[in-house]
Amino acid sequence: MILSDADILRRLEDGDLVIEPLDDPDIQIQPASVDLRLGREFLEFQRTNIPSIHPNSEQEVEEYVEETVVEEGKEFILHPGDFVLGTTYERVEIPPDLIAHVEGRSSLGRLAIVVHATAGLCDPGFEGKITLELSNLGTAPVALSPGMRISQLTFTELKTPAERPYGEERGSKYQDQKGPQASKIQGDREFGGDQ
């Protein structure tokens, strides 16, 4: 079952679903979703002469990205063909009986802005800010303003709560992230990690 606005409000009031700060519920809570705003931090992928990125090399991934923090009142310009990691302004806590889906807002989609490449899911138990995979599929640069509504979350209720929710107990790599996070794929078991 997908949660309606009434269900979302009830879960927020009960405190088992957390979205903070939710400064303007009348605007942010939609009929079956919650709009989340854009944070100020971005990880930009640098053009490089390396032949490829090896997912098992943390050093290569770190060398490939550069952090940008947008000053108050300024904008981040997303150029055609660019791919950057952004973050939501809000921090979320998803209870064990819900799964959240990160979606783009149609108004930005009509400007050719995509908010996720593949990571459109917040598992039961996830806590933290959401990393956005921002792309400009259009032909003109688009100005993104921190604080603007950039994405939306929909919530689906699970038939039974997750027995092993996302989090510290599982060794989840992105739990409690505070801004955009570069890939930590090198921690996957197939690359010698423990996850």
Image: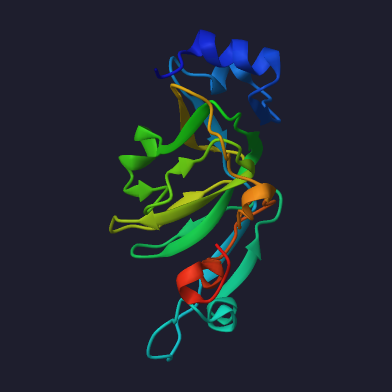
Number of marks in the rendered image: 0
Residue 188 horizontal side relative to residue 69, left or right? left
User: Is 124 situated above or below 15?
Assistant: below
User: Percent x, y for residue 173?
Assistant: 61, 58
Comparing 68 with 165, the one in front is 165
Q: Nearer the viewer, residue 33 or 72?
A: 33
| The image quarter in which residue 65 lies | bottom right
Residue 129 image-quadrant placement: top right
175 to the left or right of 60: right
Q: Is residue 150 visible?
A: yes
Colour scheme employed for the rendering of this structure: rainbow
Q: Quadrant of the C terminus?
A: bottom right
For image coordinates 65% across by 34% down, the residue present is 93
In the image, residue 20 lies at what x, y percent? 70, 31
In percent of the image, x 53 and y 19: which residue is there?
29
How far from the left and from the top, in percent, is residue 37?
A: 57, 37
Relative horizontal placement of residue 61, taking residue 19 as reference (left or right): left
Please indicate, yes or no, whether residue 176 appears anywhere in the rendered image.
Answer: no
| Viewport quadrant of the N terminus | top left
The extreme front residue here reads 163
Residue 100: x and y, percent? 48, 33
Which residue is painted at 46% across and 17% down in the image? 3
Q: What residue lies at 44% left-to-right and 82% top-to-bottom?
A: 54
